[in-house]
Image (cartoon, helix red, strand yellow):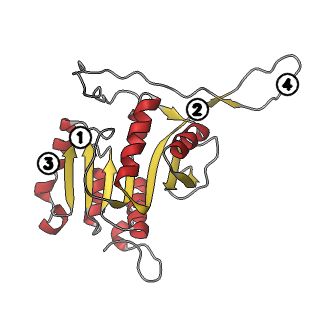
Amino acid sequence: MGGNDARGRTPLSLVGQEPDLLFYTRQAAEHGAPVLVLGAANGRVVWALAEHGYTAVGVDPSEVMIRSAEERRASEPTEVSNRARFLVADPRALRMPDRFPLVLAPQHALGLMPGNDDLEAFLATVRHHLTPDGTFVYDVLNTPREPVLPRDDEEPNAGLEPRRPLFALHLRERKQPGVPSPIRRLKLRHFSPQELDAALNAAGFIPRERYGRFDGKPFDLEDSRHIGVAGP
């Protein structure tokens, strides 16, 4: 099993690891495995978890991404390879019988959801696969902030206001009847904390922690990234 040693120190195998991979590996150390990774992309998070002793299932709607993830299997030791599994599936519609103590949506996976219905469906998938006391961890782009010119009756140095969340357009393949439109990786949607908290609450989650960087820096509105931890 990976994670910190008995004194809470980081193992040498984690030293120098990319910040997001180190963060997600520590989440697995705290919350346990198996881990479900929604929006696995090229599998870097799944393989990092497998290398440190955690069984992980990576799901992505892109066959190209999953093929890229599988290409690494031949170069991994058998015990590591056996801990990693990949599926091509739409995270909005995925339903497996398995339950996981930890579900991850890394690398701005939620930002690929172009509309609120898509986000709701994604979070329903998370809730379906979590154990009753499980943990959901995600990272997304925070809504950029920009100066707003004050009105005549305001102080000259009025505060900043966040821009409206970006609902990015995505190219879609021709939709088949009864099948959700495919997700294409072009632009990422930004989320304000309030918008994402509302979506989490509506899906039955309670936000627990929020960071602005993978090193655990507390989140503030100037951060470009929003890293969150939530549970049922």
Q: Distance between the residues labelled 2 and 3?
A: 36 Å
Cα distance in 3D space between marks 2 and 4: 21 Å
Q: Is residue 145 left or right of residue 70?
A: right
Q: Which of marks 3 and 1 is nearer the N terminus?
A: 3
Q: Nearer the viewer, residue 192 or 220?
A: 192
33 vs 170: above or below: below
Label drawn at residue 89:
1
Query: Residue 232: x and y, percent?
Result: 49, 56
Label 2 sits on what residue type? Pro
* Residue linked to disc 3: 71
Which element carries disc 3, helix, strand or loop?
A: helix
Q: Earlier in the sequence, mark 1 or mark 2?
A: 1
Question: For this view, does 151 lie left or right of residue 31?
Answer: right
x, y percent for residue 206 = 55, 53
Residue of label 4: 156
Contact (Cβ within 8 Å) of mark 2 with mark 3: no
